[in-house]
Image (spheres, grey):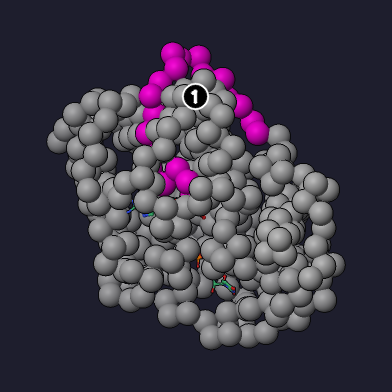
Amino acid sequence: KTTRPLSSLPNVNALFGEVRVVRSKQRPRHILVTGGAGFLGSHLCERLLKAGHTVICVDNFSTGLERNIRHLRNFDRFSVLKHDVIHPIDIEVDEIYNLACPASPPHYQADPVHTMKTCVLGALNLLELAARTGARIFQASTSEIYGDPLVHPQVEGYWGNVNSFGPRSCYDEGKRSAETLFFDFNKKHHVEIKVARIFNTYGPHMRPDDGRVVSNFIVQALKGQDITIYGDGSQTRSFCFVNDLIDGFQQLMATEPSFTGPVNLGNPVEFTILELAEMVIQMTGSRSKTIRNPLPTDDPRQRRPDISLAQRELGWQPMVPLATGLEKTIHYFDRLLAEEAHELAE
Ligand code: NAD
Ligand code: UDP
């Protein structure tokens, strides 16, 4: 095997580039992040710790990785609890970010009943904790709320076009039910809620075997494997870099109690999947070829967020163009794959 010596490789976690630290004007808080060892959750934990807060990461490590949070163990304000959110949890907290849920289609479809439980019972358990502690609670909702949308771009007022019993339903309908619970707890129990509808986001800390399109294409290109285009590649997505999204989380959480969302958070620049494949091939200098695989059932044809509400209420919009974010992500996977190859060779 050809491997580079580990000593020549920068630490993967040093590769995020600039982590934007939002210094809170308020007192440090005790913040619970469910799904904190996952892709988005690990970035959020890092941001909150760097802003001076105490962070409790709750995760069942189904798709999350110890590697994603290893570097955070240096903070004595960081703790990790292995726990499944389908079971109640009782700890003293000031704020909750509910991110626990597999987000990649192959992962959330692997155990659809557990995905539904995670979405619905997870939301219920965390909302009950919020009601008891008075904590403000954030929900990682999703653009999948809109299903295969008939309105384009998607505005928050659109109710969506969702199949209730297809392969994606455990996730889509689970997340829709979770939104319902959030708004009912807000109305009935006056829980302060913040509901973000997240559109396709990518960046460092995705798993190489995550199965979502950006990580698949980059890993395939770096390994010289065929790039798997599902369908004819004319379907569209709008890709947001993780740092931008985490800015949006923090700006949403800092809004007045009267602003609950739901609010779209995503990058409004739309690409076809073929365009994404071409960019990845060109940026990695790969000799990989594209191949066609069947389009998964109920795969949405087009997706682009209307972010006017986020711009108006949060003063937020993404700053990182796709090419810049892809460059950072390719760099991350390049080092990660080299580290993995080195470990295998040892
Ligand atoms: P991810 O799979 O990388 O992270 C999910 C984390 O939740 C993992 O650490 C996993 O182990 C944990 N988890 C899953 N089920 C759990 C359970 N029952 N109990 C405790 N922990 C559990 O996914 P991600 O991309 O980081 O997504 C995070 C959240 O954001 C999810 O709720 C997802 O639905 C939402 N979201 C993400 C995107 C995106 O593009 N990344 C888009 C829309 C919505
Ligand atoms: N996709 C693809 N090749 C892959 C993985 C995904 O062509 O290897 C397509 C998929 O069919 C979808 C789009 O890329 O049209 C985005 O897929 P992803 O799983 O990343 O997110 P989601 O479908 O949940 O938006």
Between residues 303 and 93, which one lies in front from this camera angle? Answer: 93
Secondary structure found at label 1: loop
Q: Quadrant of the N terminus?
A: bottom right
| 59 lies left or right of 281 | left
* Residue at screen point 42% across, 53% down: 61
> 68 or 300: which is nearer to us?
68
- In the drawing, does residue 247 fall left or right of residue 252? right
- Which residue is drawn at the image coordinates 43% and 80% (left, top)? 297
Tell me which corner region of the image, top left, top right, bottom left or bottom right, holds residue 46.
top right
Give residue 157's position: percent from left, percent from top: 37, 51
Q: Is residue 244 magenta?
A: no
- Furthest residue to the front? 346
Q: Main secondary structure of the magenta part?
A: loop
* Residue 291 in picture, x, y percent from top left: 67, 84
Q: Residues within 10 Å of mark 1 (few under 14, many from 20)?
A: few
The amino acid type found where label 1 is placed reads: Asp
Q: Is residue 27 magenta?
A: yes
**Residue interval drawn in magenta:** 19-38
